[in-house]
Amino acid sequence: MQIELEFELFTLKAEIFDTPTGRSVWASLPVTAQVLTWGDEFYFGIPAEAQLEAKAEAVVEIGALAYWPTMPAFCVFFGPTPVSHGQEARAASPVNVFGKLLAMDLNVLRSVRDGDELTVRQVTA
């Protein structure tokens, strides 16, 4: 399952995994939201519902798409956050990784600011 994350100046393509969280996020799209940033992460509220999965973790790969049940939020990790050790991408608490960015330009991602509007939509063949 592929999605697009569209900002005013650029669009990111990503893959959603076939997991319970991935299916819930997919079903909740499209979503338009204003993002919040936290170090090299941006996130936004999403109407998807999912429980913390058995494989949930706080340290994720660069480029991971994750669901944070606390908000609930859709999170995109592209580098260290305020709680990271070194260059790892670390969430505030465990998250469900449900996808990954397919291409990533860190300089573009670092241009994202609090309040930027984003639309996430399904890409169908």
Image (cartoon, grey):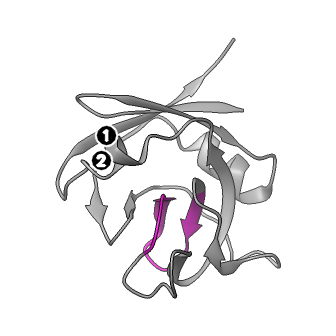
Q: Please, what is the three-letter code of the amino acid marked with disc 2?
A: Ala
Sequence-first disc among 2 and 1? 2
Q: Is residue 48 above or below residue 80?
A: above
Contact, mark 2 vs mark 1 (Cβ under 8 Å): yes
Q: How many dots with numbers?
A: 2
At a point 51% along the width and 83% down the height, the residue shown is 86
Spatial CA span between label 2 and label 1: 6 Å
- Image quadrant holding the N terminus, namely top right
Mark 2 element type: strand
Q: Which residue is mark 2?
A: 33
Splitting the image into 4 quarters, where does residue 95 fall? Answer: bottom right
Give x and y (percent) for residue 125: 69, 11
Give x and y (percent) for residue 36: 27, 63
Region in magenta: 65-80
At a point 64% along the width and 70% down the height, the residue shown is 60
At a point 53% along the width and 78% down the height, the residue shown is 90
At a point 48% along the width and 58% down the height, the residue shown is 78
- Mark 2 Cα-neighbour bin, 10 Å: few <14, some 14–19, many ≥20: some
Give x and y (percent) for residue 32: 33, 40
Indicate which label's residue lies in the foreground, 2 or 1: 1
Splitting the image into 4 quarters, where does residue 44 fall? Answer: bottom left
Give x and y (percent) for residue 120: 44, 36
Q: Is residue 124 above or below residue 86?
A: above
Q: Is residue 99 above or below residue 31?
A: below
Q: Please, what is the three-letter code of the amino acid marked with disc 1?
A: Leu
- Mark 1 Cα-neighbour bin, 10 Å: few <14, some 14–19, many ≥20: many
Magenta-drawn stretch contains 36: no
Q: Which residue is mark 1?
A: 118
- Find residue 87 and name its label: none
Farthest residue toward the front?
Answer: 86
Magenta-drawn stretch contains 79: yes
